Image (spheres, rainbow, N blue to C red):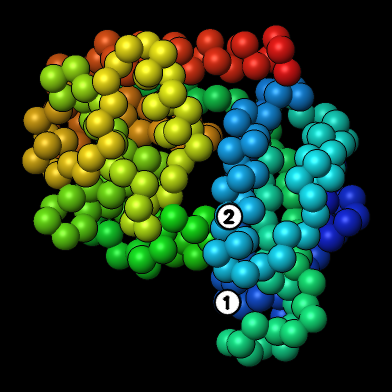
Amino acid sequence: MSRVAFVDGAYVDMASARISIEDRGFQFGDSIYEVIHFVGDFYVDAEGHLDRLERSLLELKIPVPLPRATLMMHVRHLRRKNRIQEGFVYIQISRGQAPRNHLFPVGASPTLVVVIKRQLFTSFEPKKIITLPDTRWKRCDIKTTNLLPNVLAKQKAFEENAFEGWLVGEGDVISEGSLSNAWIVKEGRLYTAPTTCNILGGITRKRLIMLAAQEKIPVVEKSFTVKDAYQAEEAFNSSSNAPLTPVVQINDRKIGTGVPGPISRRLHQAYLRFVEDGLRHG
């Protein structure tokens, strides 16, 4: 069966889906996106993702194309049309179609694209990461499609046989990964960078902080350096597509004992229980 997408109010075959070459998302990266993992009809932390989507639109002064209830109705219908039990929904909204001009176009309507893709939760498999210079713009808190620095970082990590690249700025401070939030464990406490304009406020990050509180695991929202990461007892990444991925090597340095640590394991199990509970209760 061919895949189906939702493009500007219509369900269309993926092979024939089209947007204009004058779409501002295509020409300027003048667009935002959101990714929501789902299992059946349970959309993990959907409200948090939709809050962030609407905030990104507000920050860029792009009108909200659909009420969230209507948008989620189309998302659910699209999942059923594609007959996918587990995967993620990708939502992208641009400022719309207009003749190329840096100024905001008058009267343009936002372009809305929704795609469903099959993907299982990644396993709790330990990974190596590398550190790289953070060359992104200064509004990383907006989830825009301007991802070229992230793409280059992820590609560099791949070329170095690493899973992810942690981005390093002034003072050797780690902000986040190319497509994930960064965490370390020191003296039994979880450390992750605070939500400023320099990082994306991860929805899975927020969920893990809540689960850590339930598990009585202290969380410190404080920036940490590469040296701090080298000296950590544990480290991991978090994202919607890979909720908690243990990091056992950073560059050429082994982290902790070189295997996933007890706090990472405990928090991962708490996350799985959260998803299972969501499946039971919707």
Q: Position of residue 191 (x, y in %)?
A: 24, 32
Q: Badge 2 is on which residue?
A: 55
Q: Is residue 275 visible?
A: yes
Count the numbered circles shown.
2
Q: Nearer the viewer, residue 86 or 203?
A: 203
The disc labelled 2 sits on which kind of residue?
Answer: Arg
Q: Is residue 258 left or right of residue 24?
A: left
Write the residue at 14% across / 44% down. 225
Splitting the image into 4 quarters, where does residue 260 fall?
top left
Quarter of the picture containing the C terminus is top right
- Quick one: SS at disc 1? helix
Q: Is residue 21 left or right of residue 187?
A: right
Classed neighbour count for the residue bearing mark 2: other residues with Cα under 10 Å, few (<14), some (14–19), many (≥20): some
Q: Does residue 60 lie above or below 184 as drawn?
A: below
Q: Is residue 141 left or right of residue 198?
A: right
Quarter of the picture containing the N terminus is top right
Tags 2 and 1 in contact by the CB under 8 Å rule?
no
Q: CA distance from mark 2 to mark 1?
A: 20 Å
Q: Please tell me which of labels 2 and 1 falls first in the chain.
A: 1
Q: Position of residue 268 (x, y in %)?
A: 42, 17
Q: Nearer the viewer, residue 83 or 191?
A: 191
Q: Position of residue 235 (x, y in %)?
A: 25, 28
Splitting the image into 4 quarters, where does residue 80 fall?
top right
Splitting the image into 4 quarters, where does residue 17 fall?
bottom right
Q: Badge 1 is on which residue?
A: 28
The disc labelled 1 sits on which kind of residue?
Answer: Phe
- Quick one: SS at disc 2? helix
Write the residue at 46% across / 41% down. 202
